Image (tube, rainbow, N blue to C red):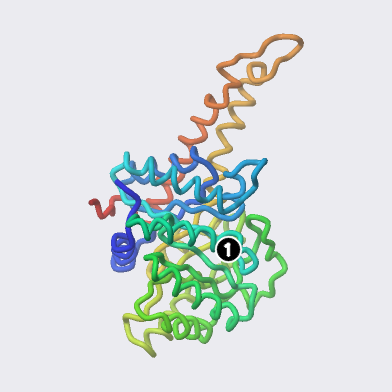
Amino acid sequence: MPVVDYQKYCQMLDNAKKNKFAYPGINVTSEITSNAVLNAFSEAKSDGLVQVSTGGGEFASGLGVKDAALGAISIARHVHFIAEKYDINVALHTDHCQANKVDSFLRPLLEESKKRVAAGEKPLYNSHMFDGSALPLKENMDIAVELLKECHELGIVLEVEAGVVGGEEDGVDNEGAPAEKLYTTPEDMLYVYERLSEVKGARYMFAATFGNVHGVYKPGNVKLKPTILKEGQDAVVGKYGKEASFDLVFHGGSGSSLEEIRETLDYGVVKMNIDTDTQYAFTRPIVEHMFKNYDGVLKIESEVGNKKMYDPRSYLKKAEDAMKERIITACKDLRSEGTTLGV
Ligand SMILES: [Zn+2]
C-alpha cells in the first residue's frame, strides 16, 4: 500500500492509543534496511514507521556527498516506491534533529514536502522530530511551536522532546547529563501541552524522558521509571481533560525488560524507537558469514577466494533477514502484531 496520508497516520496513532500498543519506529540507513522493515511489518501484520536520523541520511547520500537531507529524501522515495508492494500501512519519520540542524536537515525536507503538496501529492515524510531538549524548555517550545505550525499546514505530525535521553546516539553524547534532566517533571509536561496547544488542531507526539538511555545497556542497567509518564499524563488530563492525553514516544529502550516496555504502553506510549537492537541483528549474521567462510571471502596465499562468498549480497541477504526477524519480535513486544488497519 502507499505510504500513509495524514488522515491514515492519525488513525494509526489513535488505534495504538486506544488499544494500548505502540508502533515500532525502526531507524534505517539504506535501501536494504528499509526493505527489512517493510517485510517485517508485512509478516507481522503490523503497521509501523520507517525512520531516518540525520546521521542515517548523511550515510545514505554516500561518502562523496554527505548531505543528510538529500539522503533522507532518497530513502523516503525508495520507501514510497517499495511500500506499494506490501499490504500494511507504513509512515515515514525523521529522528532527532537538534536546533543547530534544523536549517540543514528539517527545512530542506519541509521544502520538499511543500513542493509535493503544492502538486497535489502527499508530503514526503509523515512526521519529523525536533529535539530541542538541550535548550531551556521555553526556547525549545518557542522553536517547536513555529515548526508545528509549518508541519500542520502540510499535513505532517511533529515529535518533540523535553528532558534528556541519556547515553550516546548518532554522535550526540548525553553521557554526562545531570540525573534530574533524565526525568521529565509533570510541570514540564504541562508546559509542553500548553505551548503546543497554541497551534490549534495540530497533531504532535512527545518524547518525555523517564530514565531512558540511547545505546546498548545490559538488562537491568537502565533505571527506567515509567511511572514518570503516568504522573505527567495524570497532571495534563487532570487539568485539561481526557483529550489532552499525550501520544508519547519511547526512545532509548534497548536493554529494557519486556515488563517495563509493556508498562509504558499503559501510560500512552504509541511509538517506540528501535535502532541499537536492529543494528546488532543486522550485523550478527555477517560476522558468522565472515568467520565461517574465512578462506572464501579472503584471497589467501595467492588463491582466488570464492566469489559466492564475497559478493556482498551473499551476507547482506542474511543480514536483512535477521533484521526482519528482530523487528517481528519488536512488533510482538509492543503488541502491534496483527493490528494493521488495512486499506
Ligand atoms: Zn532517540
The yes-or-no answer for disc 1 within 8 Å of ligand 1 is no
Q: Nearer the viewer, residue 87 or 329?
A: 87
> Is residue 231 something one can see in this rendering?
no
334 vs 311: above or below: below
Residue 221 visible at all: yes
Q: Position of residue 326 (x, y in %)?
A: 46, 44
Of 201 and 40, which appears nearest the observer? 201
Q: Position of residue 94 (x, y in %)?
A: 50, 58
Q: Residue at the location (69% across, 62% down)? A: 173
Query: Is 256 displayed left or right of 230 in the figure?
Result: right
Compared with residue 236, is residue 92 higher up or lower down, i.e. above or below? Answer: above
Residue 124, placed above or below residue 165: above
The residue positioned farthest toward the right in the image shown? 301
Q: Observer-nearest residue: 131 or 258?
A: 131
Question: Residue 266, image x and y in percent?
Answer: 37, 69
* Picture residue at 41% right of the left edge, 84% below the top: 236
Q: Nearer the viewer, residue 154 or 88?
A: 154
Type of the residue with mark 1: Cys
**Residue at label 1?**
97
> At 33% from the left edge and 86% from the top edge, which residue is drawn?
241
Residue at the farthest top position: 303
Circle 1 packing at 10 Å, graded few (<14), some (14-19), many (20+), is: many
Q: Whereabouts is ligand 1, in terms of quadrant?
A: bottom right
Q: Position of residue 74 (x, y in %)?
A: 50, 45
SS of the residue under disc 1:
loop
Report how many numbered discs are placed on residues in the image. Answer: 1
For image coordinates 32% across by 80% down, the residue present is 243
Give the farthest residue toward the left.
343
